[in-house]
């Protein structure tokens, strides 16, 4: 994917991770593993956003996206493993994972 396309689509990734964070904040039954993964996604997304917006080095940008995907995979596994999360949390985490994966694939 071209850096310009990544820059255009990255805000959608940020929004989906924000939705997952908000859904998780009101979900008292979510396991700590999921909370940790989503928290890390939020942190890495902020750092990645700066690089994505300022960098023209495709390799660096791809590396950041791959790191996000790994954390997204952890969050997806945690939400699939837990039967106690709310449907809102489950959907938000899975959508965030899909957004990150889509960004990497394109």
Image (tube, rainbow, N blue to C red):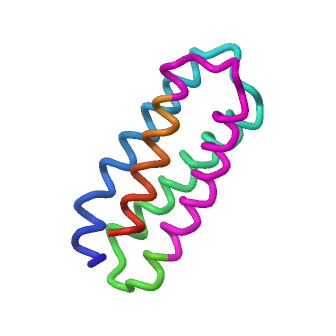
Instruction: Please count the marks in the image.
Output: 0
Using the image, determine if residue 53 lies above or below residue 95: below
- Residue 99 or 47: which is nearer the viewer? 99
The residue at the point 22 percent across, 61 percent down is 8
Using the image, determine if residue 90 lies above or below residue 3: above
Q: To which quarter of the image does residue 4 belong?
A: bottom left
For the N terminus, the quadrant is bottom left
Say whether residue 42 is left or right of residue 39.
Answer: left
Percent of width and height locating residue 20: 49, 32
The residue at the point 69 percent across, 18 percent down is 84
- Give the overall secondary structure of the magenta segment: helix
Q: Which residues are magenta?
A: 63-90
Say whether residue 31 is left or right of residue 93.
Answer: right
The residue at the point 46 percent across, 31 percent down is 92
Percent of width and height locating residue 37: 67, 44
Percent of width and height locating residue 98: 43, 49
Q: To which quarter of the image does residue 24 belong?
A: top right
Question: Is 74 within the magenta?
Answer: yes
Say whether residue 27 is left or right of residue 84.
Answer: left
The residue at the point 34 percent across, 73 percent down is 54
Question: Is 11 within the magenta?
Answer: no
Percent of width and height locating residue 50: 41, 63
Kindly give the residue lying farthest to the right in the view shown: 32
For the C terminus, the quadrant is bottom left
């Amino acid at each position: 994917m071209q850096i310009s396309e990544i820059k255009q689509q990255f805000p959608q990734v940020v929004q989906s991770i924000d939705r997952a964070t908000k859904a998780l904040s009101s979900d008292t039954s979510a396991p700590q593993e999921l909370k940790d993964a989503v928290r890390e996604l939020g942190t890495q997304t902020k750092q990645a956003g700066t690089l994505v917006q300022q960098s023209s080095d495709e390799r660096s940008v791809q590396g950041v996206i791959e790191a996000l995907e790994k954390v997204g995979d952890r969050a997806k596994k945690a939400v699939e493993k837990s039967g106690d999360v709310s449907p809102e949390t489950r959907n938000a985490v899975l959508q965030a994972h899909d957004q990150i994966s889509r960004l990497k694939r394109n």
